[in-house]
Amino acid sequence: MNLAWSRSFMWDGAINHLDMQSLFPITHPNEMNESLDHVVSKLQSSNVYPSLYYKAFGDSMITGERTLKSLSQFMLTLVSANSKYDSVMRNETQFNEQQRRGYKLFKTNCASCHTEPLFTNAQFENNGLPLDSTLNDFGRMNVTHNPSDSLKFKVPTLRNIEFSFPYMHDGRFKRLSEVITHYTLGIQQSNTLSKQLRKPILLSSNEKVDLIAFLLTLSDRTFLFNPKYSYPRSIYFPETKD
């Protein structure tokens, strides 16, 4: 899979329904390069899936629509809400002093786009990244053809950001420190730059460390390492346990 392409495509808002989200990775030549009909054919010939479709739908008919709906229904189960941040918000624990300072910095400098509790405002923003000359991806403008949407991409959630690298819509940064350096020193001015970024973000070295300490509290290991979301060995190998 071309990871950079995948990230940039999905962040331009071209997909507007969860049932259709899986179709593009399946069929696009830069990713799985499959056809939905061929996928359905392979599922139909499987020794496993007809019985699973029967349990889900009441009969063993496998169709493209049912396949996409099954994938979207699974994605709806992927709810992350048990990070340290969540525990603090539920008054079950407290941030340490460094995390508390980082949270304050976050609310001052980041929360207008990465709005709690989902840590996204669900909008499209130009975050000041220069155009990737290889991808030539102009973001939302590729969908709307409106120049005012140039270099605007969907604001991602920051939940589990510790584990979601590489960062930015095209995966150009590998470390959170690089992301923060971009926002403090690397903003490229343009007509479509997010209004929240027109005023410089000034952080000392210690403040950058504090901010990262807070961002790490958004990691939900209970969710990330839940065996329910791992490879379903019990389906293919019934004699074993997940």
Image: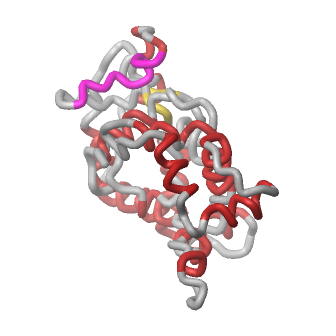
Magenta stretch: includes residue 137: yes
- The spot of residue 207 in percent (x, y) is 38, 56
Q: Which color scheme did the rendering employ for the protein?
A: secondary structure
- Image point (51%, 72%), residue name: 231
- The spot of residue 176 in percent (x, y) is 34, 55
Q: Residue furthest right?
A: 58
Up the image or down, 89 lies above or below 226; here it is above
Residue 88 in view: no
Q: Quadrant of residue 59?
A: bottom right
- Image point (63%, 34%), residue name: 17
Up the image or down, 118 lies above or below 43; here it is above
Dominant secondary structure of the magenta stretch? loop
Residue 6 in view: yes
* 175 vs 66, nearest the viewer: 66
In this rendering, position of residue 75 left or right of residue 134: right
Magenta stretch: includes residue 127: no
Q: Residue furthest bottom?
A: 239
- Image point (44%, 22%), residue name: 140
* 97 vs 56, nearest the viewer: 56
Please state the total of marks drawn on the protein image. Answer: 0
- Image point (25%, 25%), residue name: 136
Q: Quadrant of residue 44?
A: bottom right
User: Magenta residues, as a range?
Assistant: 135-143
In this rendering, position of residue 210 left or right of residue 173: right
In this rendering, position of residue 218 left or right of residue 30: right
- The spot of residue 157 in percent (x, y) is 53, 47
Q: Residue furthest front?
A: 45
Q: Check the picture and name the quadrant holding the C terminus.
A: bottom right
Q: Quadrant of residue 21?
A: top right
